[in-house]
Structure formats: structure tokens, C-alpha cells
Image: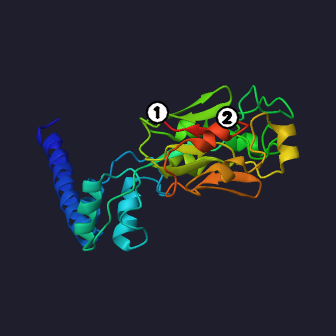
């Protein structure tokens, strides 16, 4: 075998490699999809947690939606005030500083206080359990407590204690990922400055609630009648607090016979 028998095929393959490389380079330029330069700029100012609390699959998707005008520049609850201002500059609009929020589970019915209708032994997922007759608690608005919200939280700010989800407000950044996934819609995003809240969302009358949970709101209106600021109201058999009116005096919590109005630490 002569050396030319080896060098010629090698040379041909090398030439073909160079040719295909050039063609790919040209094709990448010709068929390149132009990306709006504002998208990476907006993305740089988002938290990067990809928590999904904004309703999009991640920060990249949100950045693209903001630039396209499909999402508000302040759609990310976890974005810093400085980040929002920068996004506003990029988009050529003024963005108000965010109101700090944190998640609050509107339920007090744990394993010891709620009445159960059956023993659930399926997948450890609230969404799956909710499909089984609304979950194992008799109260249709009771926390299922299987931790779907825990799995959704990127900040380790929520855990399940005695069958009830509990938020660590010191860790919660208010992204809303847990609230978006809760099948009972029991997790609300409230102002971080809030001092008290009603931890129940039962909409049954008082007599029915008493049979379903030892700590459910019975719509007695004692809290409403005793609030000096007019911040507490009872509608659809459940009390709620207007956090914009609440002064944090704590009278409602003191008067509540069911002790479901709690101070938020």
C-alpha cells in the first residue's frame, strides 16, 4: 500500500469537513432568528429562580412575554425594587416599586382539629388527592396537606405540619408559586406588613362548620363587631381582614371564640 492511498482519502474528508463547516456557518447567519436585545437585558434583572409564580414556565419565558407586551413589567413578585426599575428603563416605562408580599395558608384544620371522611393512601400530591372527592377532609375548603406547595417553593419557605401547610414568612419572597398550584386555592398572597389574618376559608354556615372542623370560622361576627378600624367583615359565612385598614391592634384575635385569627410573625 502506498502512502498516497491513505493521504488522498484523508485529504478528501478534511476538505469535506471544511466545506460543511463553512456551509453551516453561512446557514447559521442566513437562517438565524433575531432575538430582541431587550429580552436578555430584562432576564438579567429577574431573580432567575424559575419558580413559575408569575404563571410562566420560567424567567426566560417571562422576559420574552414582558418584551412582547404580553406580561406586565412587574409580573414577578420576587423581583427587587431595583430590578423592576431597571426593567422599566429597558421597556421605556415607569414601574412602581413592588408591594412586598408573602404567602398565607387560609386554613387551621390540621390532623387534630379537622374531621376526615376517609383515609387517603394515594400519591403524595394535593392535586391527585383533590380528585378523590375533594380530598380526605370533610371541609371542602380544608388544606389537603400533602405538600404540593412545598415542592413548588424554591426558597424552602413552606412546610407541612400535622397535615397543614405552614409558611415561614422570614423565607417567603412572595413569588406566588405555591398559591398557583394549590388545588383548593387556600394560599393567598398578602402584604408582608400584615399583622393579623383569618386562617379559614370555609363558606359553610356556622352549624355545618362546627361539624366539619373544631377551629373553622362560624361567622359569629364577633370580630367584625369589635374591630375599631372596620377592617374585619364577614361575607359568605367567613371573616376576612382588609389589610389596608388593619391597624394591628389584635382585638379581633382576642375576641375570636375559635382562635383562628392569628398574628403573623
Q: Quadrant of residue 49?
A: top left
Q: Quadrant of residue 67?
A: bottom left
Give the camera-side residue of 159 and 248: 248
Q: Of the residues under marks 2 and 1, which one precedes in the sequence?
A: 2
Residue at mark 2 to residue at mark 1: CA–CA distance? 16 Å
Q: Position of residue 26 (x, y in %)?
A: 20, 67
Check disc 1 and report the residue beneath it: 156
Mark 1: few/some/many CA within 10 Å (<14, 14-19, 20+)? few
Q: Position of residue 191 (x, y in %)?
A: 46, 51
Residue drawn at x 59%, y 42% is: 251
Report helix, strand or loop for mark 1. Answer: loop
- Residue 145 badge: 2
Of the 4 image quadrants, the one containing the N terminus is top left
Colour setup of the view: rainbow
Residue drawn at x 49%, y 39% is: 153
Q: Quadrant of residue 89?
A: bottom left
Along the horizontal axis of the image, is 100 left or right of 25? right
Residue drawn at x 64%, y 42% is: 199
Q: Position of residue 129 (x, y in %)?
A: 74, 40
Amino acid at each position: 500500500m502506498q502512502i498516497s492511498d491513505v493521504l488522498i482519502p484523508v485529504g478528501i474528508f478534511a476538505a469535506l469537513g471544511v466545506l460543511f463547516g463553512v456551509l453551516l456557518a453561512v446557514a447559521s447567519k442566513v437562517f438565524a432568528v433575531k432575538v430582541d436585545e431587550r429580552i436578555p437585558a430584562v432576564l438579567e434583572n429577574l431573580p432567575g429562580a424559575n419558580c413559575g409564580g408569575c404563571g410562566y414556565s420560567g424567567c426566560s419565558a417571562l422576559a420574552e412575554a414582558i418584551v412582547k407586551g404580553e406580561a406586565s413589567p412587574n409580573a414577578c413578585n420576587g423581583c427587587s425594587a431595583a430590578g423592576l426599575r431597571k426593567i422599566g428603563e429597558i421597556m421605556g416605562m415607569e414601574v412602581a416599586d413592588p408591594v412586598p408580599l408573602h404567602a398565607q395558608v387560609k386554613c387551621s384544620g390540621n390532623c387534630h382539629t379537622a374531621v376526615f371522611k376517609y383515609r387517603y393512601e394515594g400519591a403524595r400530591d394535593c392535586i391527585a388527592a383533590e380528585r378523590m372527592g375533594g380530598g380526605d377532609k370533610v371541609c371542602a375548603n380544608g388544606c389537603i396537606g400533602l405538600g404540593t406547595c412545598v415542592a413548588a417553593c424554591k426558597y424552602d419557605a413552606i412546610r407541612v405540619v400535622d397535615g397543614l401547610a405552614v409558611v415561614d414568612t422570614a423565607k417567603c419572597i412572595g413569588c406566588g408559586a405555591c398559591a398557583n398550584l394549590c388545588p383548593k386555592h387556600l394560599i393567598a398572597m398578602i402584604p408582608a406588613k400584615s399583622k393579623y389574618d383569618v386562617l379559614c376559608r370555609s363558606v359553610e354556615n356556622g352549624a355545618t362548620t362546627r361539624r366539619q372542623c373544631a377551629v373553622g370560622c362560624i361567622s359569629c361576627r364577633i370580630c367584625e363587631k369589635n374591630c375599631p378600624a372596620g377592617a374585619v367583615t364577614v361575607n359568605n359565612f367567613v371573616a376576612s381582614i382588609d389589610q389596608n385598614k388593619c391597624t394591628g391592634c389584635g382585638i379581633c384575635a382576642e375576641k375570636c371564640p375559635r382562635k383562628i385569627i392569628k398574628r403573623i410573625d
